[in-house]
Image (tube, rainbow, N blue to C red):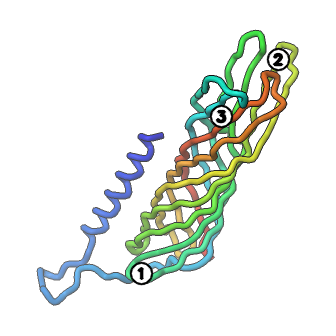
Amino acid sequence: MKHAAIVLGGALLLTGTAQGADLSWNGGAAATPFYSSSSAFNWSGFYAGVNAGYGGGSSIREATVGGPEIEDNTGGWSAGGQVGYNMDMGGGFIAGVEADGQWSSIGFDEDIGAAGTFESGIDAYGTLRGRAGMAFDRVMPYVTAGAAVGRGTMSTTDAANVVTSQSNTHLGWTVGAGLEAAATDNLTIKAEYLYVDLGTQTYSGLPGGSVDGTQRFSVVRAGLNYKF
């Protein structure tokens, strides 16, 4: 997922460079401004939409009574929706807030020998974030950060196919960046990267005893918004 962040960052840089190349120029006339701080597209207002992508990271667990940490790589899809509000602050600067909710299969499973199979993952998560971007007419690169909440599950399936499962609510934070572009006056498309740290919670009642589980992952996703 680090590579995804680098790719997205490069896309934002190239977008800004391309927009700079399109600034109007009038034969080198010194009196003619080559950049207009006002955006022809109106980004202000409420919007709602859908998104989907892929996430991966790490799941860390440790016996609550103490012991070695076990870290496993996680991966899976993520899909959901978002609602938000943008405000044009002038000079091309756009500030806003966005909330989203996601269904998720980000997790892992492993064979634990005679004890059966162990699984751990995030079933659902959501974020509440601030957004800040710079609009170049119909294209806006932005950064975003805020709070995150997720529903985690750990389970074991023994040799007799008996499942023991425990779920818990994680609270954490998220940070990321994205690129949004207006396809029409009401429809925008976006590509977004988020890093989500959901912190640690205790899972009790598992066959091996209580476990402290930590969930961290990155998500790269595409989305479609309708601007009201």
Task: Give the Cα distance between marks 3 and 1.
Answer: 44 Å
Q: Callout 2 environment at 10 Å: few (<14), some (14 to 19), or many (20+)?
A: some
The amino acid type of the residue labelled 2 equals Asp
Q: Which type of secondary structure does the marked residue at label 3 adopt? A: strand
* Residue 2 position within the rendered picture, expressed as x and y whole percent measured from the top left: 44, 41
Q: Position of residue 104 (x, y in %)?
A: 68, 43
- The residue lying toward the viewer, choosing from 32 and 187, is 32
Q: Is residue 109 left or right of residue 139?
A: right
| Precedes in sequence: disc 3 or disc 1 | 1
Residue 90, placed above or below residue 151: below
Return the residue at label 3: 107
Image location of residue 223, percent across then percent down? 57, 57
Side of 53 relative to 213 (left or right) = left
Residue pictured at 60% horizontal, 33% vertical: 74
Closer to the camera: disc 1 or disc 2?
Answer: 2
- Residue where numbered disc 2 is placed: 158
Compare marks 2 and 3 and give the one earlier in the sequence.
3
Give the left or right position of residue 91, taking residue 87 as reference: left
Which residue in the protein does label 1 denote? Answer: 40
Q: Residue at x 38, y 81 (%)?
A: 91
Q: Amino acid at mark 1?
A: Ala
How far across and down, in percent of the image, does residue 23 sit?
26, 74
**Residue depicted at x 64% and y 54%:** 148
User: Tag 3: residue type?
Assistant: Gly
Label 2 with label 3: CB-CB less than 8 Å: no
Mark 2 lies on a secondary structure that is loop
Q: Pointers 3 and 1 in contact (CB under 8 A)?
A: no
Q: Earlier in the sequence, mark 1 or mark 2?
A: 1
